[in-house]
Image: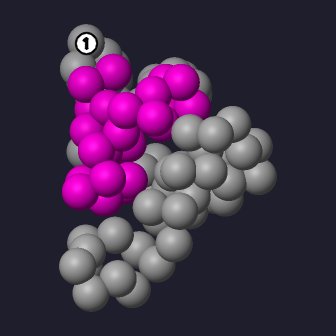
Amino acid sequence: MDVNDDRQAPGERELVAAVARGDQQAFAELFDRHAAPAQRMLLRLGYAETAIDSALHEVFLEFWRAAPRMNPAVPVGAQLLALAVLQLRGSAPADAAA
């Protein structure tokens, strides 16, 4: 891990830079690293799985488009999770639908 950046997982900055250049394999690797943990966290926050799936789809699509503008000082997972929560703000938690 880079001594100057102890908040990013090893290789994260390089992967984001590769995604910014249009590298689909780098995007797939970031998706594989972050989609399931984000989904688990959002489930713990009480959102419905169908709403989470839709939100994560939108978030990763936006990440693909915005990678050149992503803040490299903020961990990728934190940025993705924040975007997902913003995407889900209007949806009711799963227990409210019952």
Residue 87 position in % (x across, y down): 33, 21
| Residue at 31% in and 58% down | 75
Q: Which residues are magenta?
A: 62-87
Above or below 74: residue 70:
above
Quarter of the image holding residue 74? bottom left
Name the quarter where the N terminus is drawn: bottom left
Left or right: 32 as drawn, with respect to 8: right
Count the marks.
1
| Residue at 26% in and 75% down | 5
Magenta segment main secondary structure:
helix
Residue 61 position in % (x across, y down): 57, 26
Quick one: label 1, few (<14), some, or many (20+) residues within 10 Å?
A: few
Left or right: 3 as drawn, with respect to 11: left
Quarter of the image holding residue 42? top left
- Amino acid carrying mark 1 in the image: Gly
Evaluate whether residue 52 shows in this view: no
Evaluate whether residue 13 shows in this view: yes
Above or below 29: residue 54:
above
Residue that protrudes farthest toward the top in the picture: 90
Residue beneath label 1, please? 90
Under circle 1, the secondary element is loop
